[in-house]
Image (cartoon, rainbow, N blue to C red):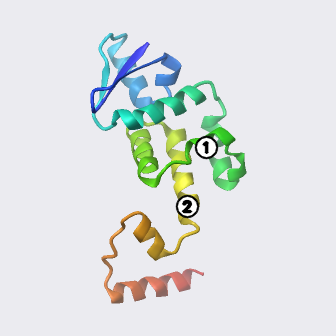
């Protein structure tokens, strides 16, 4: 068993297969050998680690994850129903899960999360994206015009 400690002190026990979905955890365990001490995760709260651990437990035996990323990027109908339901969460939580997966180096979860965000923003206007994700528009009118011209040339 591998013990993980979130930034807010919550402890999680996971089996090796679940823990090793994270390259960070795998490297720590490999470097330290067996340890009875919990592995501190200062960048992940317990609330978010619950989601990350749930994802890893579900997919720990899923060999196709490493090879299917390019496929799901081309055809998102290949995403399992469980994964679709898993990513149906509020935006702020989804972004925290993606950030935690990136910190823990869980590539399939990062890819799934980024795809979920991409599906959302693909349907939004620039202004709606700015509003939804609190993105500040710091372009001058001249810069905006220059960008529009460059985008037109790319079409």
Residue 65, quarter of picture? top right
Between the C-alphas of marks 1 and 2, the distance is 15 Å
Q: Position of residue 75 (x, y in %)?
A: 70, 53
Left or right: residue 116 versus residue 39 is right
Q: Position of residue 142 (x, y in %)?
A: 34, 89
Query: Residue tagged by mark 2?
Result: 120
122 up-or-down from 76: above or below: below
Q: Position of residue 15 (x, y in %)?
A: 49, 16
Is the C-beta separation of discs 1 and 2 under 8 Å? no
Q: Work out whether mark 1 precedes mark 2 in sequence or the reverse, and give the earlier one.
A: 1
Left or right: residue 147 versus residue 7 is right
Q: Nearer the viewer, mark 1 or mark 2?
A: 1
Query: Residue tagged by mark 1?
Result: 85
Pick the front one: 149 or 17: 17
The answer to whether residue 104 of the structure is visible from this angle is no
Q: Residue at x 54, y 26 (%)?
A: 57
Mark 2 Cα shell of 10 Å, populated few (<14), some (14-19), many (≥20): few
Query: Considering the numbered disc 2 on the image, is that residue within a helix, a strand or a loop?
Result: helix
Q: Residue at x 49, y 44 (%)?
A: 110
Q: Residue at x 54, y 85 (%)?
A: 153
64 up-or-down from 95: above or below: above
Report the disc number at residue 72.
none
Query: Considering the numbered disc 1 on the image, is that residue within a helix, a strand or a loop?
Result: helix
Q: Position of residue 124 (x, y in %)?
A: 54, 70
The answer to whether residue 31 of the structure is visible from this angle is yes
């Amino acid at each position: 068993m591998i013990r993980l400690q979130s930034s807010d002190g919550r402890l999680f026990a996971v089996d090796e297969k679940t823990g090793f979905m994270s390259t960070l955890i795998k490297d720590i365990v490999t470097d330290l050998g067996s340890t009875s001490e919990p592995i501190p995760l200062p960048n992940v709260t317990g609330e978010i680690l619950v989601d990350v651990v749930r994802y890893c437990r579900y997919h720990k035996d899923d060999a196709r994850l490493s090879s299917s990323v390019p496929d799901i990027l081309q055809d998102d109908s290949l995403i399992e129903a469980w994964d679709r339901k898993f990513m149906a969460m509020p935006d702020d939580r989804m972004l925290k899960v993606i950030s935690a997966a990136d910190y823990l180096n869980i590539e399939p979860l990062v890819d799934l999360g980024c795809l979920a965000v991409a599906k959302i923003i693909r349907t939004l206007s620039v202004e709606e994206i700015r509003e939804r994700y609190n993105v500040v528009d710091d372009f001058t009118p001249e810069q905006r015009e220059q960008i529009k011209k460059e985008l037109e040339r790319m079409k």
